[in-house]
Every structure is written in C-alpha cells, then in structure tokens.
Amino acid sequence: MQQNKTEETCALVAGVVSVDRAPVDPLLETAARALRAKGYRVGGFVQEERIADGCCAATYLRDIEDGRSVLITQILGAEAKGCRLDPQRLAAASVELEKLLDGDIDLLVLNRFGKDEAEGRGFRSVIEKALGLGIPVLTGVREAYAPTLVEFAGDYGTTLAPDGAAIIGWCLDVLGQREGARSASAKTAA
C-alpha cells in the first residue's frame, strides 16, 4: 500500500482499501471497538446493506456509538439503473458527523471515501473539518478511489491493507502522536 507521509506531518486520514469490492466495514468496526476498549472516544458510521422490497439492497449507515441505523439510499425498484444514493439523507448524516467533531472525539470512522467524496461531495467536508481539528479519520475506500483519497489528503493521507492488525496499529500510532502533541503543547503553555 502507498504511504504518503513526511517527517513534519502525520497521516491523519487512512483509507482501508477494499479489494474487489470486499466489505471493509467489519474491519472498521472491530478497530473502533478495540480503541473504545482502550478508552478512546471513537464515533462515526459503518455501512450495512439490507435487502429491501425483495429487489435490490438498501444501504444504511449504522452509528458505531449507539447502533442507530439511518437509510441513505432511495428505493427505486428492481428496474432502476441510476444512483440510488439519497443526497438529502447523506447531507443529514454529514451534519450529524460535523456536530460529533465539535465534541470530544479522538477518532472518526467513515464508511466510505467513494465517488461522491472524490467529486467533492458526500463526507468530504466532514473529512476536511476533521483534518482542520487534527482529528484522525479512518475510512473505507475502493481501489479506484484510493489515489484520489491520498491526493485529497496530501501529506496527511495514507492507505492501509484490509488487515485488522495493521488498521489498529495505525490507529494507535496516530492517536499516540496526537496525545504526544497535546502534551507538548500543554507543557509549552505552562
């Protein structure tokens, strides 16, 4: 996997690469659980697909803190060919995540950096806000969008293999660096 990191910056955005559309949400959720068990506050969404109306799958975002699910696709019927993503529901989820970033959160988990984010929509503004606040972001990304994620995040972006130990390792590393920076700032201010 490509790593784009310099001595001066820490990769704050990591995309877990989905190879051949294999789901990475279970890996994101496992990492979130492990970090929460260590006392970190982790928030965000993982994605779930459920069969709807006996035709195509409906996509839900499940909040990793409280388990609440929100439908983000439109049920267009079995013959529909266009994008089923509901932009209004996605926008509402983005607002919810931006509010979460204003709280005391250590790591943000996002189900995807996909086509919408690559084109400047979707959760892109949420990722930008997290970067501005120094909050690490762990997200899933398909192989096709991985280069766009790294380009978007610049020196703050990296990709990870879909490996649980590597994902948790990156999280602990970035959270440790963040804590170290906070300690140094507190000592300087005192």
Image (cartoon, grey):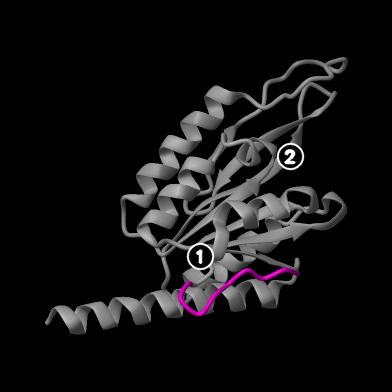
- Quadrant where the C terminus is found in the figure: bottom left
What stretch of residues is rendered in magenta?
Answer: 1-9
Tell whether position 7 is magenta: yes
Residue 172: image location, x then y, percent: 52, 77
Give the residue displayed 38% in from the left and 48% down from the top.
100
Quadrant location of residue 188? bottom left
Give the residue displayed 67% in from the left and 54% down from the top.
140
Out of 59 and 4, give the one closest to the viewer.
Answer: 4
User: Can you identify the residue that label 1 sits on?
Assistant: 12
**Label 1 sits on what residue type?**
Leu
Q: Is residue 160 left or right of residue 19?
A: left
Out of 146 and 8, give the one closest to the viewer.
Answer: 8
Q: Main secondary structure of the magenta part?
A: loop
Give the residue displayed 54% in from the left and 75% down from the top.
6
Give the residue displayed 41% in from the left and 65% down from the top.
106
Residue at disc 2, secondary structure: strand
**Label 2 sits on what residue type?**
Glu
Q: Characterize the local packing of mark 2: few (<14), some (14-19) or many (20 or more) Cα atoms within 10 angstroms.
A: few
Q: Is residue 119 above or below residue 35?
A: above
Rounded to the nearest whole Å, what is the CA distance between mark 1 and mark 2? 28 Å
User: Can you identify the residue that label 2 sits on?
Assistant: 49
Residue 174: image location, x then y, percent: 49, 74
| Dot label at residue 186 | none
